[in-house]
Image (cartoon, rainbow, N blue to C red):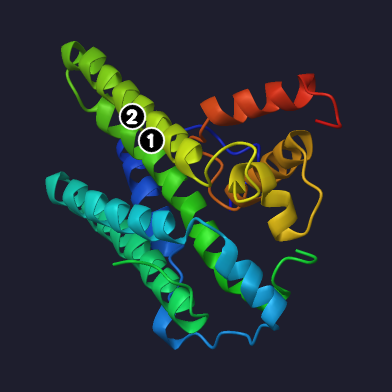
Amino acid sequence: MMSAAAPTIQIGSQQHRQILARFFLDSHVDFVPESIVWPKLAEPSRARLTALPFWQEAMATENITSNTVAAAARLEPDPEIRKAIEMQGFEENRHARLLVALTSHYRIKVDMPPRYFGRELIAIFEPVVQEEARHILFFVNWVKYRRSQLPWWKRPAFRLRCAWIILKQVASRIKTARTMGGASDSSDNFMMSAHQEVGESVTLNSLLKVCLSENERRMGQYDARLLRPRLVPVLAKFAYRVLPAGI
């Protein structure tokens, strides 16, 4: 890991390409979802786990993402970067396999830290969350690297395409949030009653604080010369500063 004072690199240079590819391949952690020994949960904890409504959506998202990344890898001309993208596709597929193993073990029907669910279960998903941070960091740099390789007259269209993809993802997440759990006054609405399901008092302000802290902690493990995502962290920092603490 580089310090915060690490020298900058020229985006699109061979040095950027090498750091981008090697950081991702070298930080890969090997584990087999099918070999995990799942902790035994007390029935109340298993019931809370089963009641969470996002298992179908989570498994579908991971499968779609792994297929999308695999398709992107086939289009990448650089052999080493292609290898890194293929690794990301493998990891996304492994996330789906992990969800299959979990839902099967705890008998969660899927078609195809304190009172939470215990430290043992949460610890199993720690590498998955860290892998997602690596995936974000890789894509931020890969997109900037790929854009730098284009002729200047192709770059505006590339930016527009990226913006369109981001808007589609935002629309998809909004649609998921709106359809998850029924009417807003329903006790089954997960978006409105999630804090009751996980057994913790959660406000938007406290959630933003945790997210910003986790972003710094997880991204801080990797080479400081690599670009970091900016849009969402900037928006989150602004919201955290202006929202009252009780909201």
**Residue at 46% in and 62% down:** 27
Q: Is residue 170 above or below residue 70?
A: above
C-alpha distance separating marks 2 and 1 = 6 Å
**Residue at 32% in and 42% down:** 17
Residue 89 image position (x, y, % from top left): 29, 58
How many C-alpha atoms fall within 10 Å of the one at disc 2: few (<14), some, or many (≥20)? few
Query: Which image quarter: residue 242?
Result: top right
Q: Is residue 117 above or below residue 21?
A: below
How many C-alpha atoms fall within 10 Å of the one at disc 1: few (<14), some, or many (≥20)? few
Task: Give the numbered dot on residue 168.
Answer: 2
Residue 203 at least partly seen:
yes
Residue 126 at least partly seen:
no
Residue 112 image position (x, y, % from top left): 29, 67
Residue 54 image position (x, y, % from top left): 49, 56
In depth, the one of 178 and 121 nearer the eye is 178
Q: Quadrant of the C terminus?
A: top right
Query: Which image quarter: residue 199?
Result: bottom right
> What's under tag 2, amino acid-wise?
Lys
- Left or right of 167, for residue 186: right
**Secondary structure type for disc 1:** helix
**Residue at 37% in and 25% down:** 167
**Secondary structure type for disc 2:** helix
> What's under tag 1, amino acid-wise?
Ser
| Number of marks | 2
Task: Give the numbered dot on residue 214.
Answer: none
Q: Is residue 75 above or below residue 198?
A: above
- Left or right of 218, for residue 206: right
Circles 2 and 1: CB atoms closer than 8 Å: yes
In depth, the one of 67 and 87 nearer the eye is 67
**Residue at 67% in and 50% down:** 194
Query: Which image quarter: residue 38?
Result: bottom right
Tag 1 residue: 172
